Image (cartoon, rainbow, N blue to C red):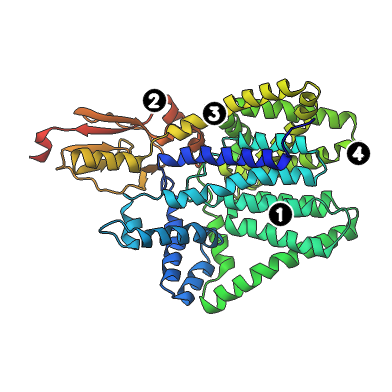
Amino acid sequence: MNLNLRATHVLSILMLVAYLLRLLLIVNGGQFYFPDESRYQRRSVSAADTLFQADFRSAIDKVLAYNKHHGFTAVGLVPAIVHRVIFFLSPPPGFSWTTYWLSRDNDYRVSALIFAIPSVLSIGMIYLLARRAGTGETEALVAAFLLAASNTFFIFSKHFLPYDSSLLIGLAALWLAIPSQQASIKNAIPTGIATFLCIWVYFGHITFVLMIALVYCGFLASNWRDSAIRASGMAFGALLIATPLFLYNNYVLGINVVSEAVKFSETVSQGEYFEGSIFPILYLGNVEAGVALVWMIGVIIAAGMLARQPQSPDLQHVRLWLACLIILYLLMVLFSAGLQMFVVYGRIARTLVPFLVMLSAFVFTPWLMSRGKKAFAVFVGVISILALANFVPAIRQEYFIEIARRARLDYGEVSYETMLRHPALPFGVYGEENPLVRYKLLNAGYYYPITEPTDLLQGKVLMQVAHPFNHRPWQYEGMTREMRDIVNRDEFYIWLIDKGSSAEA
């Protein structure tokens, strides 16, 4: 099919549109919604300031010192340095770099502009992966478009989290892995390096990393000798990065990386282990909605075609993507419902999406090409509408930091309280409870666990905003089924209540 524009130009336009949509997502703020986002402030932001002050030794220590999701500090250093330079050129009055981040009342969207880039680059990486596997340009573009339409690859873009960066590196590792049909140390070493970097940035992608290793050393290997060469090369590549990190932490900083990593792995327990087998289906069905239905149709048809022609050379990449999809899913089930080593979260389940979109692209592209440009236009239009139906609620979502800021500007001092009963604990609440304050701001924070709420305080309702807990994607990041039911049964709100002058008596 003649696309009129070169495929690279079409891909560039697609990625530009994807980034512009992420700018709309960033406009409303929302940074520091997740408690884990504070790691960016504690590690990368601090290291950027130390580097800015030319204290290079301390900066190196902060970047290399083991911390949860160790490599995220290095990745976050890029947006942190850019933000630090802009802060230096135009500092907000009354703030130092440290107090600027501690107050939580400032504009952190400069960093978010850079955090949005990895998910956009993943769209390009899907195109490269598809081409590397032997597909045509049109099929690769359709796969990239379907990933651009993915809500799960959209929603984390503005948050200070390692998920998008780690997965981009993981996709690059897979790109390095798939072309080789013969054993090659030269290919295995960089594959091992990239695979290690994926888990170094975000430990939660261990299932994705193991899938790459199993596919590269097993599915793509021609014999046992080939497997051994691939595995040894991958291990050597990983050790090239891991060994100096381990030695520096152990002998210079006095940190036992292995024991600390084991302790951290035991904390991935929010949610329910038994949901592991059905969780990815629930998550993708609820978060992607109509787009997930398109993927499901594509995967079913692709699997049927492969079952009818298992040895067809034209279906070689279909075998590869199905193998990746099945292995990845089974690893999630094994480590959650099986071994109960960790709970599957939405951010882990979404690693299935790249293979869903590439299988769907394989199915739909020939059908669309046989029907011409009008069919392509209709397909793009329908998928875009389905995607926007997911994107718009995310773009319009209001977060408690901005809501609290608005309440203080309009009404002065407020008392931060919650309707959730014990043992719910507040995270990301940047104020205190004060019974003598007239204005009560309820539920303006991230609470865990979600418990049955109490009755609403008596008083005049000045503000009522849907809590981010109501946003379906966030209900799959550690909530149990019971917690999701509590939130969805009666929509959970952030309230500002005026108790009247008697509260200040």
> What secondary structure is found at the residue carrying circle 1?
helix
Q: How crowded is mark 3: few (under 14 residues within 10 Å), some or many (20 or more)?
A: some
The residue tagged 2 is: 490
On the image, the x and y values in percent for residue 468 come to: 41, 36
Q: What residue sits right under mark 4 in the picture? A: 313
Give the spatial CA distance, label 1 vs label 4.
Answer: 24 Å
Comes first in the chain, label 1 or label 3? 1
Marks 2 and 3, how far apart at CA: 26 Å
**Label 4: how many residues lie within 10 Å, few (<14), some (14-19) or many (20+)?**
few
The kind of residue on which mark 2 rests is: Asp
Q: How far apart are marks 1 and 3 (CA)?
A: 30 Å
505 over 366 or under it: above or below: below
Q: Which of marks 2 and 3 is in front?
A: 3
Residue at x-position 91% and y-position 36%: 312
Circle nearer the N terminus (1, 2): 1
Question: Under tag 2, what secondary structure?
Answer: loop
Q: Indicate the position of residue 339 as horizontal and vertical percent values.
A: 64, 48
Q: Looking at the image, is mark 3 or mark 4 earlier in the sequence?
A: 4
Q: Position of residue 467 (x, y in %)?
A: 38, 34
Residue 173's disc number: 1
Q: Which of 335 and 139 is in front in this view?
A: 139
- In the image, residue 397 above or below residue 188: above
What SS does tag 3 mark?
helix
Q: Residues within 10 Å of mark 1 (few under 14, many from 20)?
A: many
- Residue 497 visible to the viewer: yes
Q: Name the residue under label 3.
A: 388
